[in-house]
Amino acid sequence: MIDSDEPDNPFAADVPGVEVQPATYVLFGASGDLAAKKLLPAVYNLYAEGRLPERFRLLGVGSRMPEHNFRDHMINAVRQHSRTAVDEQVLESLLERCDYIQGDFTKPALFTKLKEKLHAGDKAVGGPTRRLFYLAVAPRFFGPIAQSLHEVGLARGADPESVLMIEKPFGHDLESAIALNEEVTAAFDESHILRLDHYLGKETVQNLLIFRFANGIFEPLWNRRYIDHVQITAAEDLGTGGRAGYYDQSGAIRDVIQNHVMQLVALTAMEPPAIFDADSIRDEKEKALKSIRCVASARGQYTAGDVDGGPVPGYLEEEDVPPTSTTDTFAALKLEVNNWRWSGTPFYIRAGKRMPRRSTEITIAFRPVPHKPFADPKVAQSIRPNLLTLSIQPNEGASLRIEAKAPGVAQELRPVRMDFLYGETFTRDTPEAYERLILDALRGDATLFTRADEVEQAWRIVDPVIDAWQRNEVPLEPYIAGTPGPASADELIRADGRKWRRL
Ligand code: BG6
């Protein structure tokens, strides 16, 4: 449908041309799981593609792994998880730019040593480098690490400049999120704090803005007058993936809804920004979130069942899950967006683990035609409203459902789809979300990072829901693993005469 000669996503188009300043990527938690699976391979791929500056260094910091193990750890991480085939020579050359120190994140000694290492590293590459402090560590360390960096002169006002990069969870409710924001902004200016939501690094999520604001035909329809409702689904077939210790404290609403799904809601609901820069886009997202409140919810927890043709245990049988846990592994919310554009057009959102399949998508359900001029009542009745589905994963693309006449002499209608599939149209490999986000951080572009006020607005929306759940006002319902969630979720949308997209 789309000619592959069309220009690429402008978010990506400018990347090769933008100069990346000399930089040191300081990775706290370098020996951990996220570093091994995502961050170290992402750095390797950026390096292999020549996207890193000439003067680049990686300095790993870990609390448990001894210094002599880092090299092997890095090699294994890249070999196991790299998106592209590993070129051993390139990897060796990257390793020459890597260093590692072991130390206790809560002790000043580590930060003094870190400062010395940074100076030594700058000397080795022949000049000062911008510092990017990436905290791939438990959130309880965010504040103390930021503070310690400040104390040794590596935070606000540092020369060369430094940036702090942190990843969710940003608090566990509004109050703790505000406290965390205060802690980190005591050490770094807000403009130097990059809060990472890996959904914003996904190509199709970025494409949502291009789709809306670089095409003339959608935006005039993008409002309450033409849109009946919006549905957003983030379904996973996986269970807790060995992270039950973390997940049980969080549940679907804190793990995925408060951050990833709310970002999708904000991008779908926001007004067009005046210009495509970090603050204009984030201002509009925050404004959209501000007008949202949740008016109904459902929650569920999976029991044993079958997923992908094999039996899986129930949530309560998973390792590290307390047998009496009431954590939600599924959450569905009905949101009202109380502003001029959306008033009366609800957003239904749901996220869950152990669903029938992995699928993240945004569906815009248009209103039915106002008048059906067909004599045959059967034809008139068969007309279904248009649906626009933006699929984020696993098959990235967009699909528009329209009514068409079935071939033949009878007047018979059939819904058909106009599809755009990323993989078919653009043959270029899609970078991993982390590659994109690390590169943007190195370039100092905050567009794809969430600002403190957005995070706080998202908590403001979900906090009352969690409170109501804690008061048991919304029952926790079981659902069988491999099914699309509890009956109460169906009821939530059916009460409005609508239904969820089939999973
Ligand atoms: C993470 C959640 O933030 O996002 C996980 O902690 C979830 O529980 C994951 O599985 C989903 O990300 P993706 O990119 O696989 O959709």
Image (cartoon, grey):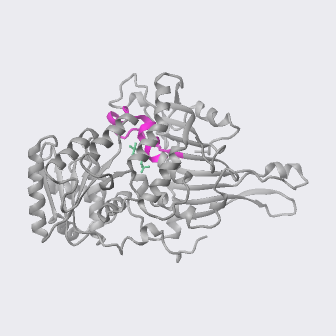
**Can you name the residue that lies furthest to the bottom here?**
5
As for residue 245 lying within the magenta part, the answer is yes
Q: Residue at x 49, y 42 (%)?
A: 309
Taking the image as shown, residue 82 lies to the left or right of residue 89, namely right
Q: Is residue 50 above or below residue 494?
A: below
Q: Identify the residue at horizontal 40%, vertical 22% (top origin).
A: 324
x then y, percent, for residue 116: 8, 56
Quadrant of res 126: bottom left
Q: Is residue 366 magenta?
A: no
Instruction: Tell which of 124 and 193 is nearer to you.
Output: 193
- The magenta span reads 233-261
Residue 315 location in percent, x, y?
42, 31
Q: Quadrant of the C terminus?
A: top right
Residue 488, x across and y down, in percent: 59, 30
On the question of residue 142 being in view, the answer is yes
In the image, taking residue 410 as reference, residue 161 lies left or right, namely left
Q: Taking 475 as reference, is 195 left or right? A: left
